[in-house]
């Protein structure tokens, strides 16, 4: 069979790919199959625009016709941005700021090394502009990888804090779809609840044994499904928690999943009065609360049980755990809603949040 490309860009992060032996396997396979490649490592968590720009230049000068991303969400997102930037004259940041829209992108294949962000199945790239202290996502179907290898054995080397961060992130991708005011969503409610229960059952097994193949298989399949679009079909999605967290990652460079573990329960408490029934359903069908007629009480119990689950995984529960004080909160809240650019769009679907609401959630989270 002829190779899919003449020249591949192999894109990866810090040291883990080489330490785990995956780098050697991939490069040997490319050589054995006569596929030429250039490489660009060094992607950091909260992937930087400067490396994306370097990748775009490399693709152009080397005539790259396919990108192979080997890593987690940061590597895959960086690869997506390079794939898009290499096919356009505009500066790649223009897409993220909404000043350009992609018409083409290089094909992208993925070898996933951490189930978390779901980028292996999503059409989204999230990039940090280190100069502007902004982290923004760009959504376009051209960015979805055409193939992703999701092999549980590649996750055995993950440290426990990365496993926990990933679990919080994959759960949040389901929450962003599950908590909605849309009616008649029985099927996707059930799919979301099954995926969440699967994650809650299997994540503690990984905390005991990072080499538990079966638990990884359950978790990784849930994570990929969580973000490929299926669970949001026919529902208004929310995404306020993500927009609120991305500003934390942009300003403080914290891990996305760890930031979400703090923000999500506070967001839930802030919005649940607008649809307590949905939160009561979550408490019973996902968090194992006993049925009761006290809908508000059930909603609160579900959130408390989620907090306890996160803390059992060792995740943070307050922004104080990162040493964050309130200094930048107004800047971040205004960036999150667009108020900083004079184009405020309220966040969320379940409850619309203005920048003042976002500020309040940051304050509550300290
Ligand atoms: O850099 P290396 O040395 O490879 O270490 C990485 C990194 O430090 C390490 N790691 C990855 N695989 C490993 C491993 N260590 C040991 N063994 C392995 N097998 O894990 C660390 C975290 O990697 P990263 O790629 O940053 O993690 P994740 O997959 O959680 O990605 C987070 C990024 O994805 C974005 C987030 O905002 C964040 O920037 N997201 C992307 C989305 C999308 N494109 O659809 C949606 C998400 O909501 C999210 O926003
Ligand atoms: Zn996420």
Image (cartoon, grey):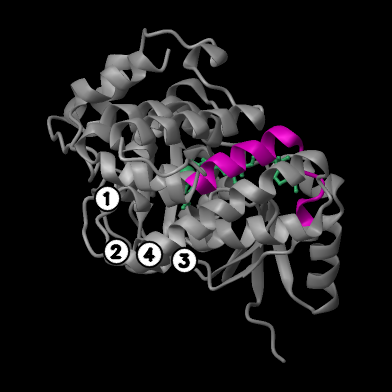
Q: Residue at x 56, y 52 (%)?
A: 197
Instruction: Say whether mark 3 is within 8 Å of ligand 1.
Output: no
How far across and down, in percent of the image, does residue 171 sit? 50, 46
Residues tagged 2 and 4 counted as in contact (Cβ below 8 A): yes
| Residue at image mark 4 | 188
97 sits left or right of 249 in the view: left
Q: Which residue is mark 3?
A: 144
Which quarter shows the C terminus? top left
Name the main secondary structure of what is drawn in magenta.
helix
Q: Are marks 1 and 3 in contact (CB under 8 Å)?
A: no
Are discs 2 and 1 less than 8 Å apart at CB? Answer: yes
Residue that label 2 marks: 185
| Residue 52 visible to an observer of this rendering | no
In the image, the segment drawn in magenta is 154-171
Q: Which of the four quarters of the rendered structure image does ligand 1 lie in? A: top right
- Left or right of 263, for residue 214: right
> How far across and down, in percent of the image, does residue 29 sit?
82, 71
Q: Distance from label 4 to label 1 (Cα)?
A: 11 Å
Q: CA distance from mark 3 to mark 2?
A: 26 Å
Q: Earlier in the sequence, mark 4 or mark 1?
A: 1
Q: CA distance from mark 2 to mark 1?
A: 9 Å
Q: Earlier in the sequence, mark 4 or mark 3?
A: 3
Q: CA distance from mark 1 to mark 3?
A: 25 Å
Please indicate, yes or no, whether residue 307 appears anywhere in the rendered image.
yes
**Quarter of the view holding residue 332:** top left
Classify mark 2: helix, strand or loop.
loop
């Amino acid at each position: 069979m002829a190779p899919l490309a003449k020249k591949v860009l192999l894109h990866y992060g810090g040291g883990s790919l080489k330490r785990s032996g995956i780098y050697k396997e991939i490069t040997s396979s490319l050589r054995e199959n006569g596929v030429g490649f250039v490489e660009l490592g060094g992607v950091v968590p909260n992937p930087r625009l400067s490396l994306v720009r370097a990748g775009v230049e490399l693709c152009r000068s080397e005539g790259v016709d396919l990108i192979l991303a080997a890593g987690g969400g940061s590597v895959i997102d960086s690869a997506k941005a390079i794939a898009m930037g290499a096919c356009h004259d505009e500066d790649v940041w223009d897409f993220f700021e909404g000043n350009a829209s992609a018409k083409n992108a290089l094909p992208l294949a993925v070898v996933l090394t951490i189930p978390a962000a779901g980028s292996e199945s999503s059409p989204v790239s999230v990039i940090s502009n280190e100069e502007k202290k902004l982290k923004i996502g760009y959504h376009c179907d051209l960015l979805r990888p055409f193939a992703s290898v999701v092999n549980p054995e590649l996750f055995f080397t993950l440290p426990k804090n990365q496993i926990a961060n990933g679990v919080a992130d994959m759960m949040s991708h389901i929450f962003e779809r599950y908590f909605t005011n849309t009616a008649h969503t029985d099927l996707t409610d059930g799919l979301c609840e099954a995926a969440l229960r699967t994650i809650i059952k299997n994540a503690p097994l990984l905390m005991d044994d990072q080499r538990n193949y079966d638990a990884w298989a359950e978790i990784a399949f849930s994570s990929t499904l969580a973000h490929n679009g299926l669970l949001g079909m026919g529902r208004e999605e929310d995404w306020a928690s993500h927009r609120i967290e991305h500003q934390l990652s942009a300003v403080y460079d914290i891990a996305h999943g760890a930031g979400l573990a703090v923000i999500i329960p506070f967001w839930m408490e802030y919005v649940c009065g607008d649809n307590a029934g949905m939160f009561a359903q979550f408490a019973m069908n996902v968090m194992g609360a006993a049925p009761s007629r006290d809908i508000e009480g059930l909603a609160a119990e579900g959130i408390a049980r989620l907090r306890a689950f996160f803390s059992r995984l060792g995740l943070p529960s307050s922004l104080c755990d990162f040493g964050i004080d309130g200094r930048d909160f107004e800047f971040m809240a205004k960036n999150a809603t667009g108020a900083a650019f004079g184009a405020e769009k309220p966040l969320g679907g379940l409850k619309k949040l203005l920048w003042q609401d976002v500020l309040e959630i940051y304050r509550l989270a300290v």
